[in-house]
Amino acid sequence: MDGLYLYCIREKTDTPCFSTKGIDEKEEVFVIPFRELEAVVSKVSFEEFASEEIQKKAREDLNWIKEKAIAHEKVIEEAMRKDDKVLSLIPMRFGTIFKERAGLEETLNKDYLKIREVLDRIRGKQEWSVKVYLKEREKFEQVIKDKNETIKEKEKEIASLPEGLAFFMEEELKEIIAKEINKELNNFAEDIFERLKDFSFDLAKGKLLEKELTGKEKPMVLNVSCLILEDRIEDFKKGVEALDQGINTKGFYLEHSGPWPVYNFSVY
């Protein structure tokens, strides 16, 4: 039994054809028009892509999930680009399937006004990602030690103690330093977040990703999605590049990328 896999919803266009294959890498991607909207879909085996089957694959076959998630993203990225323009669209979460066209159209009809409100809100804007990493922990730790009076006093106290007592005090000092580092990292991340407001229409903090997911050796300290007005994209790029130069001297570095499908600002 076939179902319809929904990738995204966008306003009507004159480009209903796609070069990218569907999530099963066999079926064509096409659009289903509905009033002033169109749903970007492809046919899939309902048995293979039903929510229960996807949940099972998530437990037993992560490679399958990864491959399908990439295919899902490719379709959305093609759907959001026309010539040199970035189209406004609402990306759907992975695994959104309808048994038949009537069910999809019923959902589009029920949520029509909400969908139009979201598309109106994000029109003329792009989502960009900003991630900040701690490049030199030792350098950052030393800066904290040099300016923190509590740490300085504790180090002086340890230096005057016999070796046996000093050991226990050193363990206490490590805890103090770790606590101060976390505090300063949070303050630093919050400062960068506030500075990003100067270039952004809206911001959304994301989870800090582990090294296994980022592929980076250095730990992530800030993950932000920025909604940027299209006529301020160049200002945004210059702004984050200047931020990167400034934080490099403190042992951090910044990466920005985009535009991405507007996942973080298109909930309806």
Image (tube, grey):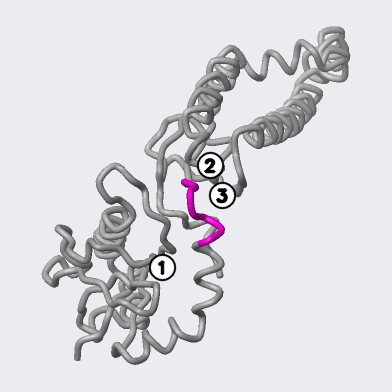
Q: Which residues are magenta?
A: 120-126
Question: Where does the C terminus fall, quadrant-wise?
Answer: bottom right
220 relative position to 26: left or right? right
Label 3 is placed on what type of residue? Lys
- Are the residues at dot 1 and dot 2 in contact (C-beta closer than 8 Å)? no
- Are the residues at dot 1 and dot 3 in contact (C-beta closer than 8 Å)? no
Q: Nearer the viewer, residue 206 or 19?
A: 19
Q: Is residue 114 above or below residue 82?
A: below
Residue at the image position 40 percent from the left and 43 percent from the top: 259
Q: Nearer the viewer, residue 31 or 98?
A: 31
- Quarter of the figure with residue 72: bottom left
Question: Where does the N terminus fall, quadrant-wise?
Answer: bottom left
Residue 173 lies in the magenta-colored region = no
- Are the residues at dot 2 and dot 3 in contact (C-beta closer than 8 Å)? no
222 relative position to 126: left or right? right
Q: Is residue 12 above or below residue 148?
A: below
Q: Is residue 260 above or below residue 60?
A: above
Q: Residues within 10 Å of mark 2 (few under 14, many from 20)?
A: many
Which mark, residue 228? 2
Label 1 is placed on what type of residue? Met
